[in-house]
Image (tube, rainbow, N blue to C red):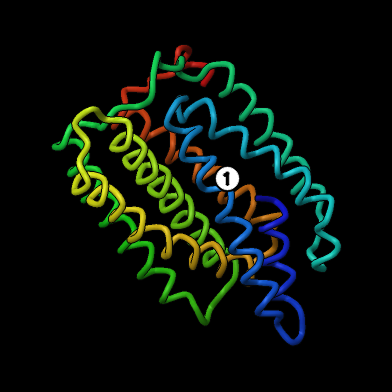
Amino acid sequence: VTVAENLQRYAQRHDPPLHALNIMGVLLGLCTSPLDMVAYSVAPQSVLAPFGMLSLILNFCVAHVHGDVFRQSDVFATLLVIAGSLTCVQSGAHGSDGPVLMPPAQTLLAYSVCIGIIAAILGSILAALRKVGGRADAFTNCLLGGVLGSSTLVAGKLIFASLVSEERTFFSVALAIIPLLTVAPVHIFVINRGYGRHPLVFMSPGLGTCGMLSNVATGCLLYNEVPVEPLYF
């Protein structure tokens, strides 16, 4: 994932832009999706999500390649994020005895409506800021990317739950694929846009934090994955 992020950043910052390398970075990021789908289907989101923060260290090591400004405040903030992530791993929800099952239909519908509204609002703000840029654009990009990333994981878990269900049919599996085909392309576009416009020293921790918070929230809402030590979490 870290290599994919840096390829996309480098390709878009190069003059002229290296479109083939950018596409390669996107495809490399997609290669991790099946592994994420399986992992998040057998373990709580509040436990796995924080591990993504470890990539921040690698992104900081190559920040100079992209010409990104490397400040002491960025280092301090990243260390705080990593320390908090490790604490979350210790205090997260326990794993279940088997693969994650399909969430209740009403809960899933309410979740879908909420995500649709949030994505529409953040997408509208992002479109309004397209010529402005700056921290506001980067922050909104991180929020939308994190929410869509979490939704993509949920969509993957729905496919896995449909495949392992004893009542599965061709129609039920095909229906479960639709959310992923809808959300994933938008998520890829949003994060690829962010990598091209903003430094990874901001985008990487921003996307990671927003994604982790979204994963924890969806884990609690859809799968009752409550942290064993909520206070420390």
Q: Position of residue 209 (x, y in %)?
A: 55, 42
Q: Position of residue 186 (x, y in %)?
A: 41, 64
Q: Position of residue 101 (x, y in %)?
A: 29, 27
Residue farthest toward the left in the current orientation of the protein = 106
Q: Crowding at label 1, few (<14), some or many (≥20) Cα neighbours within 10 Å?
A: many
What's the amino acid at mark 1? Gly
Q: Nearer the viewer, residue 170 or 117?
A: 170
Per the image, label 1 sits on a secondary structure element best described as: helix
Determine whether, in the image, residue 137 is placed left or right of residue 220. right
Asked if 222 appears above or below 181 in the picture, the reply is above
Residue farthest toward the bottom in the current orientation of the protein = 16
Asked if 123 appears above or below 86 in the picture, the reply is below
Residue lying at 18% horizontally and 44% vertically, measured from the top left: 109
Residue that numbered label 1 is attached to: 208
Residue lying at 49% horizontally and 68% vertically, measured from the top left: 189
Asked if 207 appears above or below 44 in the picture, the reply is below
Determine whether, in the image, residue 171 is placed left or right of residue 196. left
Residue lying at 22% horizontally and 46% vertically, measured from the top left: 170
Q: Position of residue 173 (x, y in %)?
A: 26, 45
Determine whether, in the image, residue 7 is placed left or right of residue 27. right
Give the mark count. 1
Residue lying at 62% horizontally and 33% vertically, measured from the top left: 51
